Image (cartoon, rainbow, N blue to C red):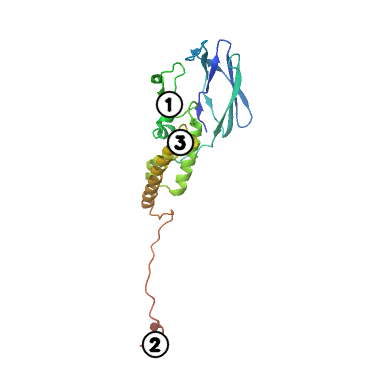
Amino acid sequence: MGDAELPFLEVAPADNTTVATLTVTAPNGTSTSVAVSPDVLVPIPDTSPVEYTQTWTADQPVEYSAAGRWVLRWAVSGTGEGAEDFEVYVVQSATSGGPTWWPGRSRVANYVPHRTLQRSLSTSQSSEDVYEMSFGTDTTPTGLQVDRLIADGAAWVSARAAPLADSMGPAASVVVALYAAAAIERGYPDDDQSLQRANDLEKRLDVMLKDLIDANNASNGTDDFGLEVAPMWQFPPADCRWDYSTYW
């Protein structure tokens, strides 16, 4: 909660008659019109007669100030007429002093950089494509979807390595990033190698999670189930003859 982004929409085909509008509806049902502006018309390669694409972008960032479901509705009139809704789910902010070790989108992208490729709309030459090394509204999955995967992974790691020692934060961040990367490949496959990459990432994840749990237990003085290890003392049973004076 409190995050902000600059929404944009790619319209194709588009021309001088194209007009786009953006309406943002908050979780409480309140709707607000957001001013948007068009970029230049860009020719679409290999079209005859030539068609164009155009990017419409919000003039100001949209701030997600409340937890819940937000709806961004784009409506296009003129050439490219249509409507499209984007749903954004916002979770409540962590309380002050909460965990700060969660990885960001860019750390997840380090393990699946090919998923951040932003293809150029102005040319068919791959040399113009750019690896963003993060996730946003123009990637699959989107940045907000990756955020939810990060939250899921953090909840899982926190349960397996509990309580998580402060010194284990950096290692836990790596484990969660691997979890999210594997979930991206498994949940959003984009080629015939995606599931194999997911398997490979999950193998690394299993090893690193085990190492994290072992290191965390050693740091906390706990066992494999996160329970404190209390010393146990054992003595041989007492000689019953001590109870009878006739033996002595």
* Residue type (three-letter) at the residue carrying disc 1: Leu
> 10 Å neighbourhood of mark 1: few (<14), some, or many (≥20)?
some
Q: Is residue 57 above or below residue 100?
A: above
Q: Residue at x 44, y 30 (%)?
A: 115
Q: Which numbered disc, 1 or 3, marks the residue that appears first in the sequence?
A: 1
Foreground mark, 2 or 1, reads 1
Q: Amino acid at mark 3?
A: Glu
Tag on residue 117? 1
Q: Residues within 10 Å of mark 2 (few under 14, many from 20)?
A: few
Q: Which amino acid type is shown beneath numbered disc 2? A: Ser
**Residue at image mark 2:** 245
Please give the name of the residue rendered at 39% of the width and 89% of the height, measured from the top-left corner: 246
Does any portion of residue 31 appear in the rendered image? yes
Residue 35 image-quadrant placement? top right
Q: Residue 19: horizontal and vertical position, in percent?
A: 58, 14
Q: Which residue is mark 3?
A: 185
